[in-house]
Amino acid sequence: MLTQDLMREVRRLQVRTKRRVEGLFAGEYHTAFKGRGIEFADVREYEPGDDVRTIDWNVTARTGKPFIKRFVEERELTVFLAVDLSASESFLSAAGPRNKRRIAIETAAVLALSASTNHDRVGLCIFTDDIELYVPPGKGRGHSLRLLRELLNFEPRSRGTDIDRVLLRLGHVLPRRGTLFLVSDFLAPGGPGSFETSLRLLSRKQEVIALQVTDPREHELPDVGMVEVFDPETGAQRLLDTASRSVRTKYRAAALQREAELAKLFGRTETDRVVLSTERPFVQDLVRYFQMRERRR
């Protein structure tokens, strides 16, 4: 992509995502991710009814009057976006205007701008079967624009997926006490169980939120006769008779089993999951999750 074309696309994405951030869920993001704790602000004179446990005895001794400590919420978070851009993300059926890759990119962009608006530190990892790009957490407009440029312009070298390897590596490089948004379709070789151990280990350091990008045709086959399908990651091809009720039933059963295994995995590892689809605006799903997260606090 030419530099001028890229910058025009960055500006279009920035305008589109900024409207979503400011108009739809900047408030939900702020209240759902309130910070990690409290920090000392200053002291003031004691007033009747104040908690005596907050008395600052050093200041009290120096002034001869009782003073208490005041605390404020430690607002700043470290947010990290791990975005799967393997070949399976390029899948698009007739159900939606954007493929899974585009949904993943725009979701990450909206989250990055939301975090930046709330003065959080944001980092980015783009991965396939390995980490192909790592941007350490940072702040500021220039940093946010860099993340948008990388999301739009990056072309992965590999087509495969290895979530287990990526999570293990992130566990070594990410700082403690942060929030990790893992954006993927989770179509990993070996199934969901292949990355359970690495996800469990990473969850000890990070709060992991799984954003699963899906397409309806991954769950239901249309009746359109003989269709040649191929795996975009391995190149394997196969001819399917979609007019066969048996074929469509087996396809749906396999998809349901995969989804059930994924739900159990996230349940066992206490990982929140948000399902995004190419057939509907992803912002609605994020808003519902943020609101649900706030209610359970």
Image (cartoon, rainbow, N blue to C red):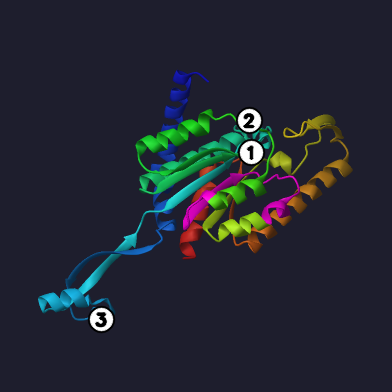
Q: Amino acid at mark 3?
A: Val
Q: Which mark is residue 157?
A: 2
Q: How far apart, in angstroms, are the residues tagged by discs 3 and 1? A: 55 Å
Disc 3 and disc 2 in contact, CB within 8 angstroms: no
Q: Which residue is mark 1?
A: 128
Q: Which sits earlier in the primary sequence, circle 3 or circle 2?
A: 3
Crowd rating for badge 2 (residues with CA inside 10 Å; few <14, some 14–19, many 20+): few
Q: Amino acid at mark 2?
A: Arg
Crowd rating for badge 1 (residues with CA inside 10 Å; few <14, some 14–19, many 20+): many
Residue 179: x and y, percent?
A: 49, 54
Q: Which mark is residue 277?
A: none
Residue 259, can we see it?
A: no
Q: How far apart, in angstroms, are the residues tagged by discs 3 and 2? A: 61 Å
Disc 1 and disc 2 in contact, CB within 8 angstroms: yes
**Relative vertical location of residue 123 with respect to residue 177 in this rendering, above or below:** above
Residue 222 falls in image quadrant: top right
Q: Nearer the viewer, residue 199 or 282?
A: 199
Residue 291: x and y, percent?
A: 48, 57
Disc 3 and disc 1 in contact, CB within 8 angstroms: no
Crowd rating for badge 3 (residues with CA inside 10 Å; few <14, some 14–19, many 20+): few
Element assignment for label 3? helix
Q: Which sits earlier in the primary sequence, circle 1 or circle 2?
A: 1
Q: Which residues are magenta?
A: 173-196
Q: Nearer the viewer, mark 3 or mark 1?
A: 1
Residue 204, can we see it?
A: yes
Element assignment for label 2? loop
Side of 168 where 58 appears, left or right: left
Q: Amino acid at mark 1?
A: Thr
Q: Nearer the viewer, mark 3 or mark 2?
A: 2
Q: Which residue is mark 3?
A: 52
